[in-house]
Image (tube, helix red, strand yellow):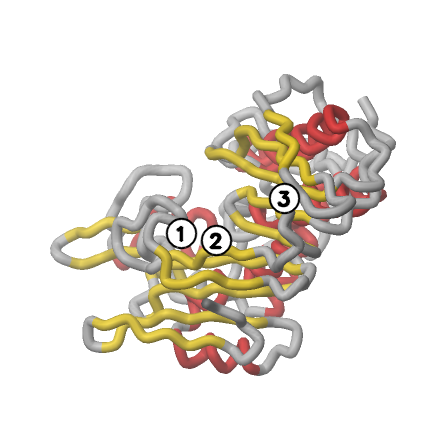
């Protein structure tokens, strides 16, 4: 099945037979000629919400909802490490797969991010997350020898720079020196980018049918234009308190979009962690060392031109720590950021000049 109404980066994808998740179409109150619609449903282990101004859009509402669901299904069947039938899961299991354009595109983008961040964001470091219990496995506490062994067997440095869509690929063929049989096969984990990337795909589709005002929330967020009241979109920034597992339940503040088209993503170590022998082990792993980070930065919120970039750079900041993360944000005119760190048991916040918080 092809979907000609999808934007150009999606039109070439051939989607599998779909079983649409339950979704709801709700007409929201608006001002003047605004006609806001909310589409909600289930994706990537949680709920999603897409709100947009349908004024002037000629595509039927049900067709828009089906298209959004199709994008999410495509991502699930391509990139999910929990869907055992996905391209990614089958690739990681050693099976030869046929990468689609989505798989190829996100791999290329991940390679660019890896190079830009000097290896701090590495989608081929998945085995490190597994041995620490933050990947697709259970909690563990690996020995130093196991960490060294795992680092040697993973990472983008071992892999080819590009994947051609439509050509057979397996976990050994992706190695830059695939003829060396004693190398460990490659494994990938796109968790640091996939949700933000998905937001961008949905936003691209909505723009392609004429939508200008939108909020796409799929765990990470992309927004553009104004909300139904004609004001800035407002996004809560959670307080990075251990155990604050419900987004929006305990806020540090509320960010205002100022009408920008951008992604906003928060990364932190207050939801995914465990404690062993009195030591907190957080899910942010530094791929360069192989160990969970141990610094004062509690959370990093990044505003970037795309949700994928915000997703990747938020992770990057959490690997860097406060001082280097702040310097990185200040060096980039296209980014805004909000960092929360621990100083002697108290939370201390820093915001870049363009980060509007109330």
Quadrant placement of the C terminus: bottom left
Seen as rendered, the residue at the extreme front is 32
Question: Badge 2 is on which residue?
Answer: 125
Position of residue 206 relative to residue 278, above or below, is: above
Question: Badge 1 is on which residue?
Answer: 128
Which residue is depicted at the point 62% across and 40% down? 50
Verify CB contact (< 8 Å) between mark 3 and mark 1.
no
Residue 215 appears in view: yes
Q: Nearer the viewer, mark 2 or mark 3?
A: 3
Q: Quick check: 130 left or right of 332?
A: left
- Under circle 2, the secondary element is loop
- Under circle 3, the secondary element is helix
Which residue is depicted at the point 63% across and 37% down? 28
Q: Please state the horizontal and vertical placement of residue 44, each as a whole percent of the image.
A: 52, 35
- Under circle 1, the secondary element is helix
Choose between 128 and 259: the one closer to the eye.
259
Verify CB contact (< 8 Å) between mark 2 and mark 1.
yes
What is the spatial separation of the Cα atoms under label 3 and label 1, in whole angstroms?
24 Å
Choose between 306 and 2: the one closer to the eye.
306
Q: Quick check: 198 left or right of 187?
A: right
Q: Quick check: 301 left or right of 98?
A: left
Q: Mark 2, residues whose alpha carbon is within 10 Å: few (<14), some, or many (≥20)?
A: many
Q: Please state the horizontal and vertical placement of residue 290, each as a whole percent of the image.
A: 38, 60
Quadrant placement of the N terminus: top right
Question: Badge 3 is on which residue?
Answer: 198
Q: Mark 3, residues whose alpha carbon is within 10 Å: few (<14), some, or many (≥20)?
A: many
Q: Nearer the viewer, mark 3 or mark 1?
A: 3
Q: Mark 1, residues whose alpha carbon is within 10 Å: few (<14), some, or many (≥20)?
A: many
Q: Please state the horizontal and vertical placement of residue 75, each as a whole percent of the image.
A: 63, 36
Q: Quick check: 311 left or right of 292?
A: right
């Amino acid at each position: 099945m092809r979907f000609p109404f999808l934007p150009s980066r999606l039109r070439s994808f051939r989607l599998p037979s779909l079983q649409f998740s339950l979704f709801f179409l709700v007409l929201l109150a608006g001002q003047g000629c605004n006609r806001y619609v909310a589409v909600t449903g289930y994706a990537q282990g949680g709920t999603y919400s897409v709100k947009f101004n349908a004024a002037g859009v000629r595509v039927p509402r049900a067709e828009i909802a089906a298209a959004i669901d199709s994008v999410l299904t495509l991502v699930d069947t391509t990139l999910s490490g929990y869907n055992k039938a996905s391209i990614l899961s089958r690739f990681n299991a050693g099976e030869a797969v046929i990468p689609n354009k989505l798989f190829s595109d996100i791999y290329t983008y991940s390679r660019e991010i890896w190079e830009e961040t000097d290896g701090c964001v590495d989608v081929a470091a998945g085995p490190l997350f597994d041995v620490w219990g933050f990947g697709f496995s259970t909690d563990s506490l690996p020995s130093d020898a196991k960490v060294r062994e795992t680092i040697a067997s993973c990472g983008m440095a071992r892999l080819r720079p590009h994947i051609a869509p439509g050509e057979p690929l397996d976990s050994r063929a992706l190695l830059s020196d695939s003829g060396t049989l004693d190398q460990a096969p490659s494994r990938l984990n796109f968790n640091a980018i996939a949700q933000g990337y998905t937001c961008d795909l949905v936003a691209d589709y909505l723009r392609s049918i004429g939508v200008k005002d939108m909020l796409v929330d799929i765990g990470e967020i992309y927004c553009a234009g104004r909300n139904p009241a004609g004001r800035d979109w407002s996004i809560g920034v959670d307080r990075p308190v251990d155990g604050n597992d419900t987004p929006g339940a305990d806020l540090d503040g509320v960010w205002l979009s100022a009408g920008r088209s951008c992604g906003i993503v928060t990364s932190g170590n207050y939801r995914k962690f465990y404690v062993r022998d009195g030591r907190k082990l957080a899910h942010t792993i530094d791929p360069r060392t192989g160990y969970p980070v141990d610094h004062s930065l509690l959370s990093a919120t990044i505003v970037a031109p795309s949700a994928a970039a915000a997703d990747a750079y938020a992770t990057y900041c959490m690997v860097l720590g406060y001082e280097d993360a702040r310097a990185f944000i200040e060096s980039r005119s296209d980014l805004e950021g909000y960092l929360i760190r621990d100083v002697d048991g108290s939370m201390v916040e820093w915001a870049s000049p363009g980060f509007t918080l109330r």
